[in-house]
Amino acid sequence: MDPLLWAAVLMLLGLALASAEVFIPSGGMIGFLSLVAVIAAVGLAFFRGPWYGLSFLGLAVFLVPAVLAAALHFWPETKFGRRVLLDVPTSEEVLPDDEQRRELKNLVGRVGEAKSLMLPGGSVLIDGRHVDAVSEGMAIEKGAWVKVVEVHGTRVIVRPTVERPGSANPDDPLSRPIDELGFNPFDESLG
């Protein structure tokens, strides 16, 4: 039988064993067998001729790392890989739970007024409370109405809106705009 055919079979066996070393914990035994098979494949190719040997050596230099990289790419998806590698926690899971973060989370969906020019950060008045906020990327003029769309940690993200903050209790005169009360406090005739 031609040594080149045996070299090809041994190269494929070595690549398969290198891939198996990643998926099967063997203490390096499968990796050692893979190395022996690849070296034997290169040796048999050199036995056939120097150009064949150099081409198999070049194949080994490029294919072995490529096969290992591909195997390591798929390893976290295997049952054993999921047991070894832990899931990466999200930033919300890592941050400690405190009162300030809970209060900021409750602002999502609320409407407020920009109290400064937001390029992209600035101050927003929401429910009578000044909050440092960041726009979603666009500039927001002072006095514009904004809506809280999300909160990441202590960063409040807002976007412009046409909504106005709704009154919590329509019977409470202090929660309604002054125009709805029926008198003008700046009218000279009252005073």
Image: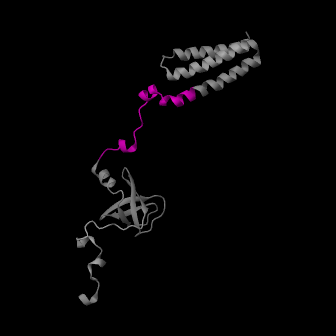
Question: Which residue is pictured at 71% across the width and 15% down the height?
Answer: 5
Q: Pick the quarter of the image with the C terminus.
A: bottom left
How many numbered discs sit on the rendered protein? 0
> Residue 172's image quarter?
bottom left
> Residue 44's image quarter?
top right
Name of the residue lying farthest toward the front = 170
Question: Which residue is pictured at 69% across the width and 20% down the height?
Answer: 57
Residue 65 included in the magenta stretch of the image: no
Residue 7 spot, x, y in % from top left: 68, 15
Above or below residue 186? Residue 127 is above
Name of the residue lying farthest toward the bottom = 189
Above or below residue 175? Residue 159 is above
Secondary structure mainly formed by the magenta segment: helix
Residue 62 spot, x, y in % from top left: 65, 26
Residue 177 spot, x, y in % from top left: 30, 74
- Specify the segment rendered in magenta: 68-97
Above or below residue 147? Residue 37 is above
Above or below residue 3? Residue 168 is below
The colouring scheme, among rainbow, by chain, secondary structure or one colour, is one colour
Q: Which of the pair 54/190 is nearer the observer?
A: 190
Question: Which residue is pictured at 29% across the width and 77% down the height?
Answer: 180
Residue 147 spot, x, y in % from top left: 39, 62
Q: Pick the quarter of the image with the N terminus.
A: top right
Question: Which residue is pictured at 65% across the width and 24% down the height?
Answer: 61
Residue 82 included in the magenta stretch of the image: yes
Relative to 168, is 155 on the left or the right? Answer: right
Relative to 119, is 53 on the left or the right? Answer: right
